[in-house]
Image (cartoon, grey):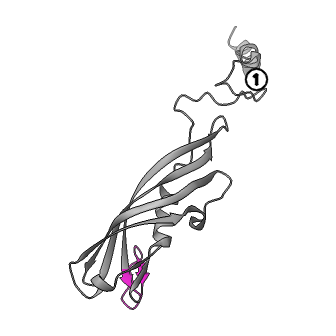
Amino acid sequence: MKIDITDIIERDGVVKRFKMDADSHKTGGGNALVNFLGDIHIEGEISNNEGILTVTADILGQLDAKCYRCLNEIVKPFSIPMEETFEHANSSKSLDSYEYSGHILDISQAVIDSIYLNIPDRILCKSECKGLCPECGCNLNDKDCKCRKESKENKGFSALRDLFKE
C-alpha cells in the first residue's frame, strides 16, 4: 500500500487524492475469529503541512467471521474511517504518528492498525441472536430445545430458596 508522494512532498498545503485496492491477506487477517473476503478498498487523500503528512481515508471491505453467540458463519461489510499523521524519519517524531522517508509513503501499517482497532470484538449474525443452549449446545435461533424448559428453575440456588421459606 505504497503511494508516490513526489508531487506533494516539496509543496506545502498540497492535497493528493488516491484510490487503491489491497490484498486482504497482506493485512494480517486470518486469525481464528475474523478473516477478510476479497480485496480491501482504500480511498482518501494526503495533505502536506510543512512536511507532516495527514492521510484521511475510508477503508471498505468484508469480514468473514463467526457469530459471537451462535457460532454461525457470517459475512459483514465494514467501512472504517482513518485519519493518521506521518512525519519524516529525520524529524522529532511524535508517538501518535507514523514515519516516512523518501518519496514513497507506505500506509500499510496505518491501514492494518485502523482495521484491527475498529473491528468489534463481538460480531453478531443479528442483534437478537439467541445463541447456543448451555445444556445441549443446539442453536436456539433454529429451534427450541427441551433443556431450557426443564431447567427454568435454577437448581443451584434451591438450597438457598428453602432458607427463605421459613
Report the residue that reaches farthest toward the bottom.
90
Q: Is residue 98 magenta?
A: yes
Location of residue 60 in the rendering, given as x and y in whole percent from the top left corner: 44, 55
User: Among all residues in the image, which is located at the extreme top?
Assistant: 166
Q: Quadrant of the C terminus?
A: top right
Query: Which residue sits at x=65%, y=31%?
Result: 131
Q: Find the magenta span and give its range.
A: 87-101
Q: Is residue 135 left or right of residue 18?
A: right
Identify the residue position indicated by label 1 in the image.
156
Amino acid type assigned to the residue bearing label 1 in the image: Gly
Residue drawn at point x = 40 percent, y = 73 percent: 96
Residue 161 image offset from top left, x and y in percent: 70, 15
Q: Residue furthest right?
A: 136
Q: Which SS class for mark 1?
A: helix
Where is residue 140, by image quadrant? Answer: top right
Residue 21 in picture, x, y percent from top left: 47, 64
- For this rendering, which residue is in front, 17 or 87? 17
Q: Is residue 163 magenta?
A: no
Q: Using the rendered view, name the quadrant where residue 136 is placed.
A: top right
Foreground of the two, 95 or 22:
22
- In the image, residue 122 lies at what x, y percent? 57, 44
What secondary structure do most residues of the magenta stretch adopt? loop
- Give above or below for 95 relative to 22: below
Q: Residue at x 73, y 18 (%)?
A: 145
Left or right of 75? Residue 118 is left
The image quadrant of residue 9 is: bottom left
Q: Residue, x 74% and y 12% (percent of image)?
A: 162
Report crowding for label 1: few under 14, some 14 to 19, many 20 or more residues within 10 A (C-alpha): few
In the image, 60: left or right of 154? left
